[in-house]
Image: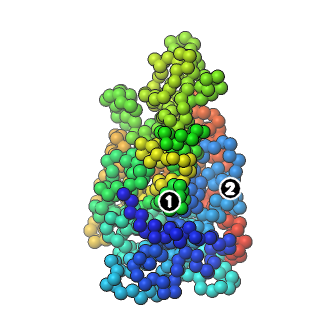
Amino acid sequence: MKMKHIYRLGTLMALGTVLSACTFLDTDPQIIPSGGYYTNETRLKYGLAGVYGALNSEALYGNYYSLQISNADDLCYFNNYNNADTRPDRYNHTAGTSVIYETWLKLYQGIKNANEYLKGVEEAQIDPEKLSVSKDRYAAEARFLRAYYHFLLAQAWGDVPLRATAADSPNPNDVQIAATPQEEVLKWCVDEIEAVVDDLDPEVEQTPSRVSRTVAEGILARIYLFMAGETVAEVNGLSKADMYKKAAEWAYEVIRSGKHQLNPSYEQVFINMIQDKYDTQYHESMWEAEFLGDRTSADKWTNGRIGDLIGLKSQSGSTNFSEWACNYSYGFYNGSYTLWQLYSETDRVESDLSQADDEDNIAGKMVIDKRRIWNLPGYNFQGYSGSHPSGGREISYKINGVDKSGILLQTRSMYRTPWNYNNIFAMRTIDGLQEVDGKFDMNDLVYEPDVMCAVRNAGKWRRETIYEQQMSAKNLYTTINFPILRYSDVLLMFAEAANEYNGPLTDRDGQAIDYQTEAKNALLAVRQRAGIATDETQLNNPQSFRELVRNERGRELAFEALRKYDLIRWGIFVERMHQAGTNIPAENKYRNVTYTNYAASTYSNVGARHIYLPIPTKELAVNHAIQQNPLW
């Protein structure tokens, strides 16, 4: 089960915190005690929990950053067509949009907490014999987190204030800080992490709850890859090639550690998160933002809406929650048709055919990517209802040229509801489907796994009660964790960076890396887990390898708040977003025009200014040394 002790130490403190209404440079510590507080290891953990705490806020990985700011990309779109708000996931936001300010504020609160904690730990006088680990390890975690929060800021906003020390002065004129260029912030981040990487825990027993050495190595690879991208200026003394080399070598340190493996089951990686469990065998999920409860009581307070806002739609109006097959979920995010094509058409081998029928595959047809089955399942829990007096939905269809009709009736939230177009269903087996007046002949059911493929809910974190514990109330907050770093991501980062650098690499012991073979093996391992064949001629040319690994990142890491920044660093963000908006299937059986038209309008909103977020209006009002981003 999850080792969430570090967070539990900080629960009461976090509950008693009131966020400041002024700038992030407020000098009054709100969470992190200092002034001789750190006299034992329990207190060191207590303070460190406050530094980690920003991660598991609703403003970061609980909702705003992970979903609204970072999850709307060419593979995923916000689907609530009744929502007229200005939102980052609709790309109609402004500098005054509250979600943007709250995320900015929370990141700088995390930085402030880290600075206060580091100051307190430095001043602490603790007998080393009374500590299980050196206090340097606690400081290393805090320095890493401080750098990570700065990375998220620079990645999303560009030039931002760099806050590397605690603010001591109460004079507001002393806390006006201009933005530091993005590339300098990012260089500071990698310098900070490289300075502490060897002080972090070399083992992985406390991951994904806490940062280990391999987590830091993986995040270093991520930052260097972003620095090597098209939108970041070069840093003096470090070329783009150098950055790719650094990214590859740091990712390889994770690989050669042997401490992480791919879970043979892709879906089990996310089932573990849904079931509130850690994978202690494979350690594929290397670092997660943790959510402790469901808000049913004060000691189960949480800020996570993973599974609730993103998941399989389940919105029954009844209150028999303990009988539902899927807990309440708005299902506000869909996978795009572009994602469907990535799974079903792009980089596929025509001879990769299923040998037999099963619940998903059809004998003689192309094998379905296992990730598509999990991420874009053929069902949600919306039920079948409509205007018929029975409450059912009327459909009409043809069988052998003969016009027929039927009525579909199925209770919401109680059964898996297949996506359908008339009598074509995305599941072979349908539970709970009622025949009304004998008007639907089950023999007329046709199975087609591609039906409604452009409007499927993002199913990576579904709240099915066979996975999540059954709820006794309409809880909108969940215990489902959000992955910050997975081993499959590390493999793909290594493959990409090694291919882009395309030159000699060495590990930290000075040993040469067979980078071409290792890059191919890393990419193939991810594809093989997905159960799909690879045309290995794609592996032998740097350009085709580049396209393959970029596509693989989309297939593997969809809905994990990474794709948007991949597109940005590749220099194709606006182009790909516009392409996704016009990439709509022509046939009605693959789309619902209400959803696809709404998605198209979102994609059409995207412009060059959306490569960066605007500096929040409230921040500009209190920090007069900072200027608004260009184009905003």
Q: Is residue 120 toward the left or the right of residue 94 in the image?
A: left
Q: CA distance from mark 1 to mark 2?
A: 33 Å
Residue at the image point whose x is 43% and y is 84% from the top: 39
Quadrant location of the N terminus in the rendered image: bottom left
- Quickly name the residue at label 1: 300
Residue at the image point whose x is 58% and y is 67% from the top: 106
Residue at the image point whose x is 40% and y is 39% from the top: 369
**Label placed on residue 41:** none
Q: What is the secondary structure assignment of the residue under circle 1?
A: helix
In this rendering, is residue 597 above or below 434? below
Q: Position of residue 391 (x, y in %)?
A: 61, 26
For the residue pair 343 and 184, the one nearer the viewer reads as 343
In this rendering, is residue 509 above or below 334? below
Pointer 1 and pointer 2: residues touching (CB < 8 Å)? no
- Quickly name the residue at label 2: 93
Judge whether residue 113 can be spotted in this image: yes
> Amino acid under label 1?
Lys
For the residue pair 301 and 526, the one nearer the viewer reads as 301
Disc 2 packing (10 Å; few <14; some 14–19; many ≥20): some
Indicate which label's residue lies in the foreground, 1 or 2: 1
